[in-house]
């Protein structure tokens, strides 16, 4: 980094040295500086598909407000994960992240955490499109808040929420108010490059009953991984851009219609992987370096369109949400160490594997709800989704030096369709003014079909005795699923609530993708897996609103766990036995004086197999992959008036991620087992000045330049590599509101 950047880093480090290692209280936003009140404000959430105060929701829940995200300069999962107890990330490369809540990860390719954006479910419901790693990492610009629900949410949210739910809540157009906001900044990464970003939004009222809001962003993402053998520097850099347009019609006081269109695209020139010794995990070619025969670019696209109608019919509320989403992911992997011999058959010396997944998803939900003031509150609804997916992989022969294409050797294609219809009901009975009982159930029916075809180059097929014509495999499946939840809660007074919760969730099964000429015993289908969660929690605010606590003790029983197994070099889905996860999650907030806010979050998670998985060389008691037993974050922020209408703020964050185990059968020992990944710490800090209209923020991330390992590429992959935390990054952000 240059002299100016070093000076900026020193300034940020100076902030961290003050002993403040905290940021804004994530669940309940602090009062604005300059006000008379000292305390924590209540935040309203929609976790249970109706507006509620967070302190009254009988489940484990974290809400990060839009102002929290702005303060933290948090634009992606990695920037705010530490503030969510029990949330773990596994990232193989930018654009592909596995979300894990409460330890529910066995290495399968189907997601255990559902992602929503407003009323739209996002991503694949099946394990045929790599849904586990293709989570929707939406940019947080112009976001009202992010809600993270821990534990199964099968009653209200259905499939793939057996571990929990991450919900993006966007800002709706505002009636009667014209507003313009903009933000621009730049940042520099140690050992890497420089990047810049720009964001803007405009809110336009159209008379008294209509408004239009549009926002957009562009990020030039700096890279920090080099490949000296190809002469490539900062090769994991890229570009990320997108926008959202939303129209609101408040036709009457009882009827509103909101139309929203959102798109996001990201392109990266390479991966975040560092080549290492498979046992010692020490770099093979130097710090932040890899060796590849060909480039490994990637591209990810999100599109989502939604129409939400909110209509009050007498005392009842009817809501209709119609959505259509598109997700497209394309990657290139250097498969030369495994498939180079095939490339040599065509006179080539490299074998890149091109993978593309595409999902088109239509959903319709209708629900009717009673007033929240009734002694018996209820919601009843219906849900339908149809998903069309395509998974295409091309194994090619190329000349590494020139990238010249020589032949398409093998092309497996899987086309699939998933349909689900479900109905649900949720009831809350206020037995007394202090005691409530909530109960709900959901019945779901899903059906799937898949077509698999594999095309071989004729010359290659002739040489190896393989039929050159496409091999077509048809698979179908269907299942009926019942999920439920029961949650009694006790309000000791207006400030303290205790609750217990029993809830279930599931992840669909389906037809299997099979290798060519599969051996006997390879399953043609895999079953759904399910979780049952028992949770006891307490949520309280004391000291005139200056101290808050949120504690949850949980036990999750998981059965028929879905696993990824490898047969003849092809990954297939299979079912194992049981696993369980149990632990404690906590969030404490404290405001000792006006402008100063403290927060401590964390989780203890003990997640293990309850049955052996012999094909993965996993035994009863093995820890589930990438789940730290201990994780925590300590945060604070201080705001005060400087002069006139200007105020200053400073804050810092310390986070800790405990040791974890890699995927089952990922080490090179004989027989293969799991490797232990060491724990790591990170420190962030920020300082700035604002006056309500203008804001300047200087920030630093990973100030200790930690090399925390976040992912390990299992042996049997084309190379043994790890992903590490982004090196020390310092940035400057300028924003304005009009």
Image (spheres, helix red, strand yellow):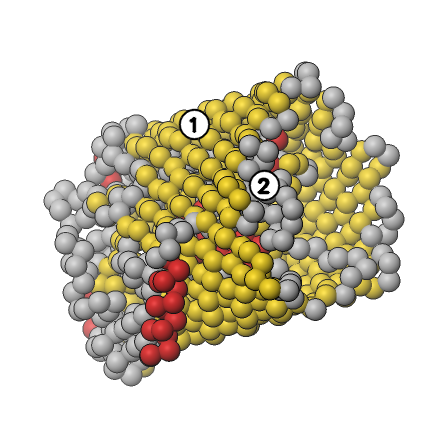
Instruction: Spot the residue most to the front.
Output: 643
Quadrant placement of the C terminus:
bottom right
From the image, state whether disc 1 or disc 2 is nearer to you.
2
Instruction: Spot the residue most to the bottom.
Output: 402
Residue 307 in the image, given as x and y percentages of width and height: 72, 53
Real-space Cα separation, disc 1 to disc 2, in angstroms? 26 Å
Residue drawn 39% across the image and 64% down it: 12
Q: Is residue 233 left or right of residue 194?
A: left
- 621 or 628, which is in the foreground? 628
Task: Check the image and report above or below for 376 versus 189.
Answer: above
Which residue position holds label 1? 553
Residue 5 in the image, given as x and y percentages of width and height: 37, 75
Quadrant placement of the N terminus:
bottom left
Q: Secondary structure at mark 1?
A: strand
Question: Residue 312 appears in which quarter of the rendering?
Answer: top right
Q: Is residue 211 left or right of residue 360?
A: right
Question: Residue 217 appears in which quarter of the rendering?
Answer: bottom right
């Amino acid at each position: 980094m240059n002299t100016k950047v070093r000076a900026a880093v020193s300034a940020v480090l100076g902030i961290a040295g003050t002993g403040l290692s905290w940021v804004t209280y994530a669940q309940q936003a602090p009062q604005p500086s300059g006000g008379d009140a000292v305390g924590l404000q209540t935040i309203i959430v929609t976790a249970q598909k109706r507006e509620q105060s967070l302190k009254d929701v009988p489940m484990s829940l974290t809400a990060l407000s839009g102002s929290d995200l702005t303060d933290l300069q948090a634009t992606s999962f990695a920037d705010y994960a530490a503030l969510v107890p029990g949330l773990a990330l596994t990232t193989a490369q930018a654009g592909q992240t596995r979300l894990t809540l409460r330890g529910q990860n066995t290495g399968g390719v189907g997601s255990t955490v559902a992602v929503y954006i407003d009323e739209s479910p996002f991503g694949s419901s099946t394990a045929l499109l790599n849904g586990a790693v293709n989570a929707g990492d939406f940019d947080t610009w112009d976001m009202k808040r992010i809600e993270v629900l821990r534990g199964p949410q099968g009653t209200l949210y259905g499939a793939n929420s057996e571990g929990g739910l991450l919900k993006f809540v966007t800002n709706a157009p505002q009636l009667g108010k014209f507003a313009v906001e903009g933000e621009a900044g730049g940042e520099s990464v140690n050992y890497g490059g420089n990047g810049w970003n720009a964001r803007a939004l405009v809110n336009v009222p159209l008379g008294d009953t209509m408004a239009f809001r549009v926002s957009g962003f562009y990020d030039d993402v700096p890279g920090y991984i080099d490949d000296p053998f190809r002469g490539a520097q900062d090769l994991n850099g890229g570009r990320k851009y997108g926008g959202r347009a939303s129209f609101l019609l408040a036709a009457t006081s009882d009827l509103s219609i909101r139309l929203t269109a959102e798109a996001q695209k990201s392109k990266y020139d390479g991966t975040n992987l560092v080549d290492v010794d498979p046992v010692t995990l020490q770099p093979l070619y130097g710090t932040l370096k890899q060796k590849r025969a060909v480039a490994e670019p990637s591209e990810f696209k999100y599109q989502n369109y939604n129409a939400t109608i909110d209509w009050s019919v007498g005392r009842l509320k009817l809501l209709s949400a119609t959505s259509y989403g598109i997700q497209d992911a394309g990657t290139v992997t250097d498969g030369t160490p495994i498939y180079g011999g095939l490339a040599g058959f065509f006179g080539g010396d490299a074998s890149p594997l091109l993978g593309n997944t595409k999902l088109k998803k239509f959903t319709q939900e209708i629900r009717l709800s009673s007033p929240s003031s009734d002694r018996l509150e209820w919601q009843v609804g219906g849900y339908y989704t149809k998903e069309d997916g395509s998974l295409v992989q091309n194994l090619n022969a190329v000349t590494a030096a020139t990238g010249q294409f020589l032949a398409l050797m093998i092309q497996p294609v899987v086309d699939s369709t998933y349909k689900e219809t479900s109905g649900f009901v949720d009831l809350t009975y206020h037995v007394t003014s202090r005691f409530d009982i909530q109960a709900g159930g959901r019945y779901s029916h899903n059906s799937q079909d898949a077509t698999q075809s594999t095309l071989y180059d004729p010359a290659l097929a002739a040489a190896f005795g393989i039929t050159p014509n496409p091999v077509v495999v048809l698979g179908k499946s269907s299942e009926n699923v019942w999920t439920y939840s029961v949650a009694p809660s006790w309000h000791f007074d207006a400030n303290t609530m205790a609750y217990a919760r029993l809830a279930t969730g599931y992840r669909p099964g389906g037809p299997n993708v099979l290798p060519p000429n599969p051996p006997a015993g390879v399953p043609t289908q895999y079953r759904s897996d399910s979780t049952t969660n028992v949770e006891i929690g307490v949520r309280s605010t004391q000291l005139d609103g200056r101290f808050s606590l949120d504690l949850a003790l949980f036990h999750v029983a998981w059965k028929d766990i879905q696993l990824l197994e490898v047969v003849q070099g092809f990954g297939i889905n299979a079912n194992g036995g049981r696993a369980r996860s149990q632990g404690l999650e906590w969030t404490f907030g404290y405001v000792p004086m006006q402008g100063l806010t403290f927060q401590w979050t964390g989780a203890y998670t003990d997640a293990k197999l309850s049955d052996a998985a012999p094909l993965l060389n996993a035994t009863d008691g093995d820890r589930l992959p990438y789940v730290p037993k201990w994780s925590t974050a300590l945060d604070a922020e201080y705001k005060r008036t400087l002069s006139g209408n200007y105020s200053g703020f400073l804050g810092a964050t310390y986070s800790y991620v405990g040791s974890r185990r890699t995927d089952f059968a990922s080490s090179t020992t004989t027989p293969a087992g799991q490797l232990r990944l060491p724990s790591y710490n990170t420190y962030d800090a920020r300082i700035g000045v604002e006056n309500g209209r203008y804001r300047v923020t200087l920030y630093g991330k990973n100030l200790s330049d930690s090399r925390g390992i976040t992912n390990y590429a299992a042996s049997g992959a084309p190379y043994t590599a790890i992903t590490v935390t982004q090196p020390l990054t310092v940035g400057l952000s300028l924003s304005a509101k009009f």
